[in-house]
Image: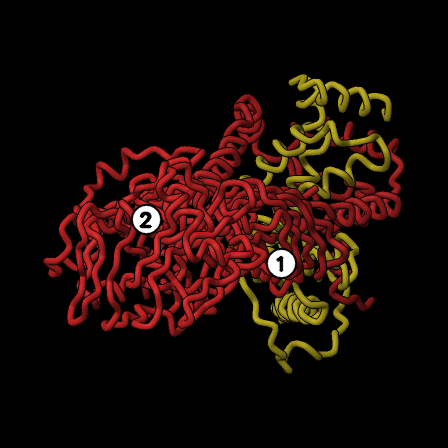
Chain colours: A yellow, B red
Amino acid sequence: MKDDLEKYIRLCIKNDREGQLKIYQLFSPVLYGICLKYMKNEDDAKDVFQEAFVIVFQKISQYKFEGSFEGWLKRIFINKLIETLNKKKKENFFLDVFDPDTDFVEEEELDAIPIEQEKLLEYIRDLPDQYRTVFNLYVFEKMKHKEIAELLKISEGTSKSNLNRAKHILQKRILSIKNFKIA
Amino acid sequence: MKKQNIEDIFSSMEDFSSVPPPELWSQIEEKLDKPKKKKRAILWWSAAACLLLGLSIPSVLHFNSTSGIKTLDNNNNVVLDKKNNDLNTNKTIPNQEINADKISTEQKSVVVDDKSSSINKSNESSTSQENQKTTVAHADAENKTNSDAITPTSKTGKTSTNPIVTKNAVATSAKENNFKLNRSNGFNTASKNQILSNDIKAANKALAEKTFNSGKANSFQSNSKNKLSNSIFEDQLNSKNTNNVAFNSSNSILNESAKQKNENFLPSKEIAGNQTSNSKFKDVLNKQDSIQLAELNNLEKGIVATESKEEKKNKTNSKAEKWAVEVFAGLANSENYKNDKTLGNANESKQGSTYGVKTKYKINKKWAVGSGFKINELGQTISKIAYTKTNSVAFMSSSDYFNQNASNATPQISTNHNYVFVSANTTNALKQNNIQSSSIQTGNLDQNLRYIEMPMEVSYAVFSKNKASINLNTGGFVGKLISNNMALNGQSIGENANANDFVYGSTLSSTLQYRVYKKTNVFVEPAMNYYMNPLNNQSFNQFQWGLNFGLNVSF
């Protein structure tokens, strides 16, 4: 399988459409899933997905067959997603202001009730852009606040604050569902 | 019931995947089929626009200033006061004549430098020899020529053998370096008329004043008996006479360009957490995509993730973007902040152009050093400077009084010695005595010194956000003179002989930069330069304001 992947990549380097389709078929679900998690609506996710995939095929010759190809793809996608979000910064810029209601709220442990992925995705996408971005990077990409701060060109404190606020909002949403279910 | 925190609840979303709508692939295909020329075209257009803007602005300003000179020329043909009816042979010289005059390389211009000369109305005029000449010369009260006096070498037997001594001399003392200034010079009653002429180089160059050829004894006396020969400022000397021009000037052109730029694109970060298993979320996917997903899962198993390795590599890459190359062009305005004067006329500012290339090395996030090469122009303009042409003006002979007393050669300023520049005080003195001369005209004297410079700069990033950045740059430069030009009314008359071959200076600038495409930036850079030593013994504009436009590519 690894040999097949390498073969497809080499075809892509030669700008072979069949190889590009293979790569697309292999990785598009994961990458499209990432786009859905980072963008507020599906149309924006589709746009970024297309643009990022075009970049992938344009830059695939830069892949040196070292390390994970999927990791390389994800990096391109996340960079593109953040670039797109930065362009919309006027509407999603978050002030780095201390908010006692959210910044230092103890994280409450919730009862383990299964929640569908569609619902969870909806909660994530309902978050404000920067909260959502920090949440995605921290929780799913396992990045540290320092790295997030560098990537988003914000302070480490802002990154922490945004993560806490995101968690707080999500917690409220989940609690409301559970309370509803209990009731 | 088991407790979970938020991260646990959302952990299932870590490997979330969703099959994209089928139409997306066709759209991607369309984009892949389109050539990637659009962005490159924008890049080249940006570069071309910057260079065009940088080069066109100085050109436009240059043409504007040239037209201004022409206007002045038309109004300044006659210098001397027309009210003086005693002068018989005053003539006005039209511009066409001036322009038609070609500068002979053998001819040498003469500058009469005068800081203060006063006319003593009690002077008596006198003429001597066959050719009666009245000289307007700078002289001491004691009628001694300064050591810097100019001695023209004349081939005319008359002038060489017959010292012209008139009692009515408009004595002018040399200014600063060229002549010793005698502020009490003037038309001295007690003094004898003197003809000032100096050998500039033992060779054949002489700076001198004017001798006036007159067939008749013409007086320009006002209340006195002073007389000038009829043809004032008419030349009896051959054009071969070597007359030197000396005048002081000091100006500086500052120019600078410093730039810095660079902003990392989004730093690449390793994304931790590869997808491990999508089987749990297959329900999210359409059935028709299940085959693709299965294949994907199989492939992923074969991929060994070396995230930490990639992370290190990415960090290295982001740090590797330390070098930047800049091309720039712009305009530079030389200023006379010290209020220097040349021959009593203020040195005025002058526009020039500048362009060059520069390399920068980023030491860290804030600091960078840079160097490169640029072509820069330092200049100054002297408006309404009085002058006369030596090929039509009688001059002093080598046996003149001044000539005989002259010991030191006057510093040579121009390689063309076709013109005699007269100080403002001299012309004023003549006017006060109602002396007219058709030979004295006024015009604009432009001086340009072009250098190839190598700056050494340090840059500090004071602001950097998204695509924009602001840097402060400071440093020094060394320049080599590559072009030296003096132009009178737009017509080249030679070079400034006092220009130093090498100049040194300091520079201060600010770079406003904006990223237009990935590692490519455009920038605007206001700058201020100071030149230490443009000329060795004259004043010249030394400050310079500059505005550069450029393109910066980091790598």
Across and down, in percent, residue B171 comes to: 35, 64
Where, by quadrant of the figure, is residue B60 drawn? top left
Q: Quadrant of the N terminus of chain B?
A: bottom right
Chain to which the residue tagged by mark 2 belongs = B
Q: Is residue B443 visible?
A: no
Q: Residue at x 48, y 55 (%)?
A: B404
Instruction: Name the residue tied to disc 1.
Output: B505
Across and down, in percent, residue B136 comes to: 32, 58
Tell me if residue B346 comes above or below residue A37 in the rendering.
Answer: below
Instruction: Name the residue tied to disc 2.
Output: B65
Tell me if residue B304 comes above or below residue B395 in the rendering.
Answer: above
Q: Residue at x 51, y 49 (%)?
A: B200
Left or right position of B396 against B517? left
The local secondary structure at tag 2 comes to helix
Q: CA distance from mark 2 to mark 1?
A: 27 Å
Across and down, in percent, residue B72 comes to: 24, 51
Query: In terms of sequence position, does the residue under pointer 2 or pointer 1 come before the other?
Result: 2
Chain to which the residue tagged by mark 1 belongs = B
Residue A48: numbered disc: none
Tell me if residue A62 comes above or below residue A32 in the rendering.
Answer: above
Q: Quadrant of the C terminus of chain B?
A: top right
**Total label count?**
2
